[in-house]
Image: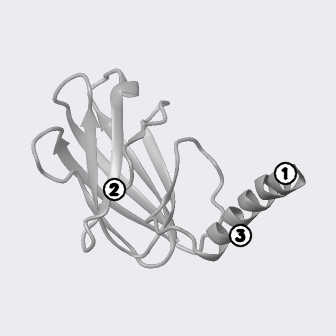
């Protein structure tokens, strides 16, 4: 009985230690609110505005991140039910994308993605209700 209890305690500890030693690869940590960035910001770059139409098979913006940074994508266009919109970014070289993420809804719909690795990225906008046209602007803080 004691061996089973110890095994149940030791196994999760080993998993936690292994995950700290060998972290999984990811291109970004995602947030949808106005959380403060974890890293110190030294510079800001702006990209856009980029006109876009959802579901047309084209990228909806492009930007570069010179060093680890935070990216905010802001959308503007017709007054729509913004809660149905979502955004992701895709690395140009690797083709890897973040998961689709919701927009924070306020005066201007946006999504912030933190800890983005250096590289060139594309923006992809989707709107669940219908085809939607607008513009995207991107702010990169690094």
Of residue 50 and residue 16, the one placed in the foreground of this image is: 16
Q: CA distance from mark 2 to mark 1?
A: 44 Å
| Residue 75: percent from left, percent from top | 34, 41
Kindly identify which residue carries mark 1: 5
Q: Secondary structure at mark 2?
A: strand
Mark found first going from the N terminus, 1 or 3:
1
Drawn side of residue 80 relative to residue 71, left or right: left
Residue 124: x and y in percent read 26, 49
Q: Position of residue 53 (x, y in %)?
A: 15, 40
* Residue 111, position as x, y percentages in the image: 45, 45
Check contact, mark 1 vs mark 3: CB within 8 A.
no
Q: CA distance from mark 1 to mark 3?
A: 19 Å
Q: Earlier in the sequence, mark 2 or mark 3?
A: 3
In the structure shown, which secondary structural element does the residue marked by tag 3 occupy? helix
The mark tally for this picture is 3
**Image quadrant of residue 59?**
bottom left
From the viewer's perspective, is the residue at label 1 or at label 3 nearer? 1
Q: Is residue 17 left or right of residue 106?
A: right
Residue marked by disc 2: 89
Disc 3 marks which residue?
17
First in residue order: circle 2 vs circle 1: 1
């Amino acid at each position: 009985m004691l061996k089973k209890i110890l095994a149940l305690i030791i196994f999760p500890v080993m998993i936690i230690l292994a995950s700290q030693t060998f972290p999984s690869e990811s291109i970004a940590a995602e947030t949808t609110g106005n959380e403060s960035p974890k890293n110190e910001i030294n510079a800001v770059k702006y990209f856009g505005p980029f006109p876009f139409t959802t579901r047309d098979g084209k990228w909806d913006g492009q930007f570069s991140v010179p060093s680890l940074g935070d990216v905010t994508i802001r959308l503007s266009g017709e007054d729509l039910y913004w809660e149905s919109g979502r955004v992701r970014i895709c690395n140009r070289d690797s083709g890897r994308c973040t998961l689709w993420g919701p927009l924070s809804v306020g005066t201007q719909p946006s999504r912030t993605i933190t800890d983005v690795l250096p590289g060139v990225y594309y923006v992809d906008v989707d709107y669940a209700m219908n085809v939607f046209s607008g513009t995207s602007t991107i702010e990169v803080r690094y």
